[in-house]
Amino acid sequence: MNRRMLLVTAGWLGAAVLAVLVGLAAVSVIGNGLTTPETRPLSAAEVADELARQVAVSPSASQGSGSRPPVTPSASAAPPTQTFPTRAGTVVGRCVGSRPEVVSMSPRQGYELHEQDRGLQDDDAEGEFRAQGGGKDRVKFEIVCRAGIPALVADD
């Protein structure tokens, strides 16, 4: 009986060790796919560069959509954008003629997009980030055009 118990115990230990090794191998294989450099988050500058490249290359960028007025092609591809980091997120703006426009708003972790007026129909291009969970911390801003260059006016 002692020998039989010893064999059963050895069998269970062998199975447990094998199960742990298979689990570790599976986590290693899955983890390599999740943490490769291709999946790292982009910085605000990298996002702005990528957007500028896509706008310059995309033929549909010069054609209007239902909510935007059509853009007439000119010698320059698209109006230059400017990235504005704030303590609550990042805002990308541009000037189309003398009209300011919010291109994108990306809240930082712990904040959310509360208000957004892209400035497509009127001269106001503004927005607000607010702390998540009903926090009172907020960052309001407005994009303005100064000599055709976008500028951020923050109302912290």
Image (cartoon, rainbow, N blue to C red):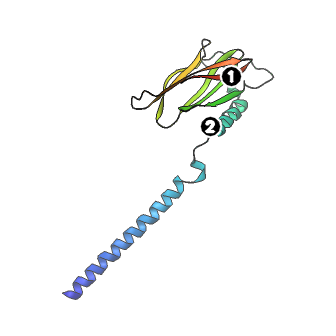
Q: Position of residue 41 (x, y in %)?
A: 57, 44
Query: Which residue is farthest left?
Result: 1
Q: Is residue 155 above or below residue 29?
A: above
Chain-order first, disc 2 or disc 1: 2
Q: Circle 2 sits on which residue?
A: 44
Mark-to-mark CA distance, 2 and 1: 17 Å
Specify few, some or many for label 1: CA neighbours under 10 Å numbering under 14, 14-19, or 20 or more: many
Lateral position of residue 5 relative to residue 31, left or right:
left
Name which residue lies at 50% across and 57% down: 31
Query: Which residue is farthest top?
Result: 122
Query: Which residue is farthest right?
Result: 75
Number of numbered discs visible in the structure rendering: 2
- Where residue 2 sits, quadrant-wise, is bottom left
Q: Position of residue 87 (x, y in %)?
A: 55, 33
Lateral position of residue 120 relative to residue 8, left or right:
right
* Secondary structure found at label 2: helix
Q: Circle 1 sits on which residue?
A: 150
* Residues under numbered marks 2 and 1 in contact, where contact means CB atoms less than 8 Å apart: no
Out of 12 and 79, give the one closest to the viewer.
79
Name which residue lies at 62% across and 12% down: 123
Name which residue lies at 66% across and 38% down: 45
Q: Position of residue 79 (x, y in %)?
A: 72, 24
